[in-house]
């Protein structure tokens, strides 16, 4: 297995502070990429996303359980820490964060999400969203009340129905995806996916060196006005035929 990873985050064009957090870790037997998008008053969102990303990544990179169990434990411990902190610090009361993470072992990606930060797979000239948003508009789409096209411009598209750290317990969705050589994973906060459609994302991911893909994505979001913090993590399963 040879996995490469890159990440970049930007405050955007409107917000005063960046409440997103991202991490990439490459180890001999596993690779991790993750994005958290914090929420809460004052600096609480920044605290929640940073705390969640550090605790979750610590579990994933040091544990020896099965991949599924590691993802469950990481989410459980991160949620408990953020929840306890919010209760014991008045200025952080009610804080929380989204989370999307991908752990790659051999040729298999274990993808976990809570909230509306997303994971996409890019391969064979196409892009597909792996995760499902935990959001109000996604529930409306599933119910057939609005179309996916309407969801992209819905005035309440930023309302999420599930977050890490806001309740004593949280449940994430876990997806297991077999990767092919050369396939890429894109993890991002909604600051990116709200500004760029899937065709834009695909074009930016496949135009130019993969090492610069995060730069291209962030620059494009900024050109669109970047109303929120913008974060991207790109992971690639290297093609063994290269080099």
Image: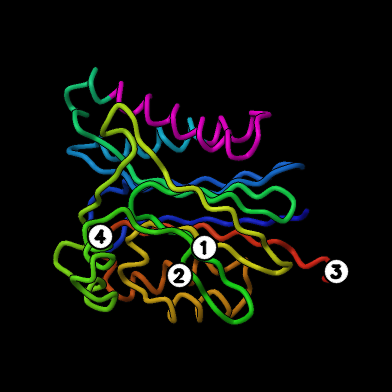
- Residue 119, image x, y percentages: 48, 59
Q: Nearer the viewer, mark 2 or mark 1?
A: 1
Find numbered disc 2 in the image and state the secondary structure of the residue it sits on.
helix
Is residue 97 rendered to the left or right of residue 4? left
Q: Nearer the viewer, mark 4 or mark 1?
A: 4
Q: Residue at x 69, y 44 (%)?
A: 30
Mark 1 and mark 2 in contact (Cβ < 8 Å)?
yes
Of the residues under marks 4 and 3, which one precedes in the sequence? 4
Range drawn in magenta: 57-85
* In front of the other: 178 or 142: 142
Q: Residue at x 34, y 30 (%)?
A: 169
Residue carrying label 4: 139
Mark 3 and mark 4 in contact (Cβ < 8 Å)?
no
> Relative to 43, does residue 219 appear above or below in the rendering?
below
Q: CA distance from mark 4 to mark 3?
A: 46 Å
Residue carrying label 2: 217
Residue carrying label 1: 186
Q: CA distance from mark 2 to mark 4?
A: 27 Å
Of the residues under marks 1 and 3, which one precedes in the sequence? 1
């Amino acid at each position: 297995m040879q996995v490469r990873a890159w990440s970049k985050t930007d405050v955007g064009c409107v917000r005063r502070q960046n409440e997103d957090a991202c991490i990439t870790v490459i180890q001999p037997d596993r690779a991790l990429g993750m994005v958290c998008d914090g929420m809460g008053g004052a600096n609480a969102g920044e605290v929640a996303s940073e705390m969640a990303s550090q605790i979750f990544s610590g579990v994933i990179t040091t544990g020896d359980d099965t991949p599924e169990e590691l993802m469950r434990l990481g989410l459980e411990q991160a949620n408990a820490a953020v929840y306890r902190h919010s209760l014991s610090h008045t200025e952080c009361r009610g804080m929380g964060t989204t989370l999307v993470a991908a752990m790659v072992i051999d040729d298999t990606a274990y993808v976990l999400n809570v909230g509306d930060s997303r994971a996409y797979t890019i391969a064979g000239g196409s892009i597909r969203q792996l995760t499902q948003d935990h959001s109000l508009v996604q529930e409306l789409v599933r119910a057939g009340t609005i179309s996916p096209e309407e969801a992209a411009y819905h005035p309440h598209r930023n309302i999420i129905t599930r977050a890490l750290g806001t309740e004593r317990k949280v449940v994430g969705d876990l997806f297991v995806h077999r990767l092919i050589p050369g396939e890429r994973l894109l993890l991002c906060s909604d600051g990116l996916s709200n500004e760029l459609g899937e065709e834009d994302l695909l074009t930016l991911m496949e135009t130019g060196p993969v090492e610069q893909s995060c730069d291209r994505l962030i620059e494009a979001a900024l050109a669109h006005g970047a109303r929120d913090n913008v974060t991207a993590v790109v992971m690639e399963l290297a093609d063994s035929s290269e080099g």
